[in-house]
Image (cartoon, grey):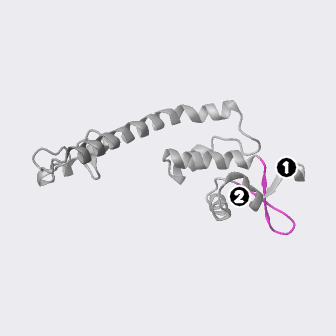
Amino acid sequence: MDKDEFLSIGQVSKRSGVASSALRFYEERGLIRSVRAGSGHRQYPRHVLRRIAFVVFAQRVGLSLDEIAAEITKLPEDHTPNGQDWSKLSKTWSLRIEEKIAELHRLKNGLSVCIGCGCLSLLTCKLANPQDKLGRYGSGPLRWMGKPKKQN
């Protein structure tokens, strides 16, 4: 690679909008790679910007860093991913995004109904849980997360 194809950590930070400390963290987690210049400073290949954009987007979709690490292994490390590379990832992402949209709709509807109705009644409120009956189905705000599933 030509030396002009490499960027310093400051340049990558500025171009990606990601703090240098986060870039070092991503590198520790194996999400991105750098090479060391003669001075010992990190130098990143220009195509790392796409990988960083992928990480940022994946975090916004709600993937954990472990999930991102598993997905990013499907991308080439030696060049900017092409349409085929992204297509491999998008198949699994569509379902994930649809689930997230449905979850956000449930949350929105629950909030507008709860805040708007003003019932303040444990007898009629959809979120009431007398004697913790929902506890047998799992933890968390089950009514907002969707239909409870009975645990074994």
Is 139 one of the magenta-colored residues? no
Q: Is residue 146 left or right of residue 80?
A: left
Task: Tell me which numbered mark, 1 or 2, is placed earlier along the sequence.
Answer: 1
User: In the rendered structure, which segment of residues is drawn in magenta?
Assistant: 33-46
Residue named by callout 1: 5
* Viewer-nearest of discs 1 and 2: 2
Residue named by callout 2: 13
Name the outermost residue toward the left.
Answer: 123
- Asked if residue 152 shows in the view, the reply is no
Q: Position of residue 77 (x, y in %)?
A: 72, 45
Residue 18: image quadrant is bottom right
Residue 99: image quadrant is top left
Residue at the image point whose x is 66% and y is 34% from the top? 85
- Asked if residue 40 shows in the view, the reply is yes
The one nearer the camera, 136 or 95, is 95
Q: Is residue 137 left or right of residue 101?
A: left
- Residue 36 in the image: above or below residue 3: below
Amino acid type indicated by mark 1: Glu
Residue at the image point whose x is 11% and y is 54% from the top? 131
Q: Position of residue 37 (x, y in %)?
A: 84, 63
- C-alpha span from label 1 to label 2: 16 Å
Residue at the image point whose x is 26% and y is 48% from the top? 115
Please tell me whether mark 1 sits on a helix, a strand or a loop: helix
